[in-house]
Amino acid sequence: MITALKHTFTEIMKRALEEARQFDKPVILSQVKSLNDSMNPLHFYAAGERLFLGERFYWATPGSRFTITGLGNECTVENDSAESDRFGRIESDWKRFKKIAHYEDGAKSHIGTGALLFGGFSFDPHNRRNERWNNYPEAKFFLPSVMLTVKDGVSFLTINRVIKPEDDLESCSAHFTTIANEVLTGKASTGEEYVNNYTLKEADTGTWLSAVQKATDLIKSGELDKVVLAREVQLEYDHKINIYSALSKLQTEQPTSFIFSFENGRQSFIGATPERLIKKENSRLLSTCLAGSIKRGKSKQEDTELGTELLNDEKNLIEHAIVVKMIKDSFEECCSEVKVSDHPQLLKTKNIQHLYTPIEGSMKAGYSLLNLTEKLHPTPALGGYPKMAAVEMIREIEPMDRGWYAGPVGWLDAENNGEFAVAIRSGLIEGEQATLFAGCGIVAESDPQMEYQETLIKLKPMLSALGGVNHECK
Ligand SMILES: C=C(O[C@H]1C=CC=C(C(=O)O)[C@@H]1O)C(=O)O
Ligand SMILES: [Mg+2]
């Protein structure tokens, strides 16, 4: 529970220290201020490089209406459990912390301020591991040292400290003062603008096409209804990739998507995903069924015609309906007042149009955000249907390790409100190298070459953000 008290911050710190000593357990103390001048969240991210390189995150909802930017890591909540309890363990480890928040300068408790965890989950803990994902375990979250939350143009600064029984008042107090001084005066270094010289490698294209063919055969023989198969491409630059510049481009070019970055040591996992998995605001739950795709038109008229074609295309409608059914069934189990429309709409991003059905409900007692995340993941937009058969088929025939691609990425706060998106249209970046991922829902009517073309469109947002928009994959 967050406790907001009208005491001076020193008194609150003393109380947090006493509690830590009395129960011999760390206490999270959060100081939240509302800022008079709004801050640019990406500049804040860039300014954090000097002190917090390797421990930063960024999250922006479509249109940047809500952003959280975290710097530093007060504590990591993680597990490498291959069992289904990896979600529940994050929740119980997080609940175990006593949290005390102090809201200053008229700031009130807002969802997404105060103590908050940001991170994500891998797609499939049972899949083989590629060593590039070594620092991304099955579940990993950071409690930032300092965080900027911007909601509808209003900025809040949260400073967190994990207070341990052996801490003293002076060092705690110095932590809050130093961080506030550093981040409010720090200058953003946005890095070098680069000329994009890179080479692109597509691994296993033939293997992927055969996998799609095999999947359609198995679907036709009745083994399952749908499976999502993904592939990866590797980019090698002649300079270090500028993450700030990539995030800025994603933000400008993909305004209908969630923009995220999880910087973890020397690697950053970033992307612009149009697909929300789950959002919880008090008892209100929202999810998005997004599956079925077509390219954008070159003219307005062609774009509308393509959209109409998608809305009436049987193969894509089947791909979409399987997702709606699964999410609706899960919502009906966990929610009252489930609302879902009978027909999909179109969701357009810069490069692609999708079939889109939002779904909402009022969460029943006994469920939680991470509960729902576990229940939904992977939806048939990322895994397939039935779930287990699809995930097993992916393990068997997809020629790669997805790591965190297509897994849930997002945040939860002290009240267990929060939001997760599915980490598609994404890439893992380290130094001069990037690995980008894209997948497609395969149903009986799928044609391998058409699905391959669909992956090319899905790679475009990240290729463009990294400066390679005109590259045509083979
Ligand atoms: C798996 C991906 O997209 C999913 C989300 C929307 C549409 C999809 C499709 O039409 O195939 C995919 O299910 C991806 O972008 O890597
Ligand atoms: Mg598709």
Image (spheres, rainbow, N blue to C red):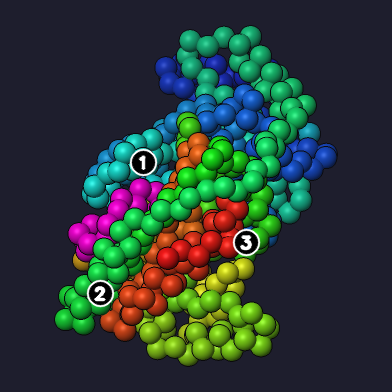
- Give me the residue at 43% from left, 72% from top: 453
Q: In which quarter of the image is the C terminus?
A: bottom left
Label 2 is placed on what type of residue?
A: Gln
Query: Which circle marks residue 213 in the picture?
Result: 2
Q: What residue sits right under mark 3 in the picture?
A: 254
Where is residue 328 shown, x and y percent of the image? 40, 73
Residue 335 seen in the figure: no
Give residue 65's quadrant in the image. bottom right
Q: Residue 410: x and y, percent?
A: 50, 49
Seen from the viewer's position, the closer of residues 10 and 261 is 261
Highlighted magenta segment, given as a residue range: 391-408
> Label 2 near label 1: C-beta < 8 Å?
no
> Looking at the image, which is closer to me, 15 or 65?
65
Along the horizontal axis of the image, is 344 left or right of 185? left
Ligand 1 contact, mark 3 (Cβ < 8 Å): no
What residue sits 46% from the left and 53% below the top?
A: 200
Say whether disc 2 or disc 3 marks the residue closer to the N-terminus: 2
Asked which secondary structure carries label 2, the reply is: helix
Q: How far apart are marks 2 and 3 (CA)?
A: 32 Å
Q: What residue type is labelled 1?
A: Trp
Query: Taking 337 as reference, is 135 above or below it?
Result: above
Residue designated by label 1: 133
